Image (spheres, rainbow, N blue to C red):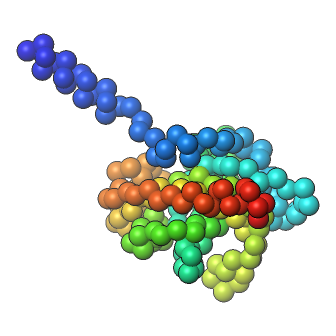
Amino acid sequence: MRSVGGFALFVLLAACTNTPLFPPDVMNGVNFDTVGIKAWKDQVSHPSANFASQKVEMEGTIIKVIPKPEGAVILIDGHPIGEDRLFHPEGKAGEDILRFAIVFNGMVDPDMLQTGNRVVVIGVTDKPALESIGWMPRPLPHLRAQCLHIWKTDESERNRFPYGDMSRATQEEQTFCHKENIEKHVSTGG
């Protein structure tokens, strides 16, 4: 009987641990300082010649996908990882959303690149470029992605729980990585 109880405790503890989304080498060098992310966001309205790229982790919701021959540009409504938008002490929900573009030069399952799916991305910040949302192009900060982790969500679940934990609406999840995106960008500066 003790072995059954010990096994049950082991299973319970294993279920409570957080499994990392990305391999440890991908996480090396990630800057979690939101001041750097604010400077990246501010590049849109106040461009600076001394903009310094940095490796960041962001999360958000896919709002549009623009297929490219080498991959895709994915437009996101997002925020820095771990920032709770619903209970942010400085403002109301939605006020601190950052709209940005992910440039991913690699293969992604087209079923995962659907509007409304959740994404976590590791990548290097880049200067803004024009992207079309609707009929009008506007400058958006860009992020050259090394890895994407995408959750495919069900529309009916998103409607039932629009402000809550999306984990209950998750149907499928996949991670996509492309090592050259970071190495090429950092080594060439562009």
Compare residues 65 and 181 and report the one nearer the observer. 181
In this rendering, the answer to whether 150 lies above or below 18 is below
Among all residues in the image, which is located at the extreme right?
A: 49
Q: Is residue 92 visible?
A: no
Q: Position of residue 22 (x, y in %)?
A: 49, 46
Pick whichever, 136 or 142, lies toward us.
142
Kindly identify the residue that appears in the image at 37 percent across and 67 percent down: 155
Tell me what residue is drawn at x 69 percent, y 77 percent. 131
Percent x, y of residue 118: 48, 59
Camera-nearest residue between 83 and 190: 190
Residue at 77% across, 47% down: 36
Quarter of the image containing the C terminus?
A: bottom right
Whether residue 40 can be seen here = yes
Is 11 placed left or right of 16 in the picture? left
Q: Quadrant of residue 105?
A: bottom right
Residue at far bottom of view: 135
Q: Quadrant of residue 144?
A: bottom right
Would residue 14 be found to the left or right of residue 38 on screen?
left
Most extreme residue toward the top is 2
Looking at the rendering, in which quadrant would you find the N terminus? Answer: top left
- How many numbered circles does the render carry? 0
- The residue located at (32%, 59%) in the rendering is 171
- Percent from the top left, x then y, of residue 101? 65, 67
Residue 182 in which image quadrant: bottom right
Residue 73 percent location from the top left of the image: 60, 72
Q: Is residue 91 left or right of residue 104?
A: right
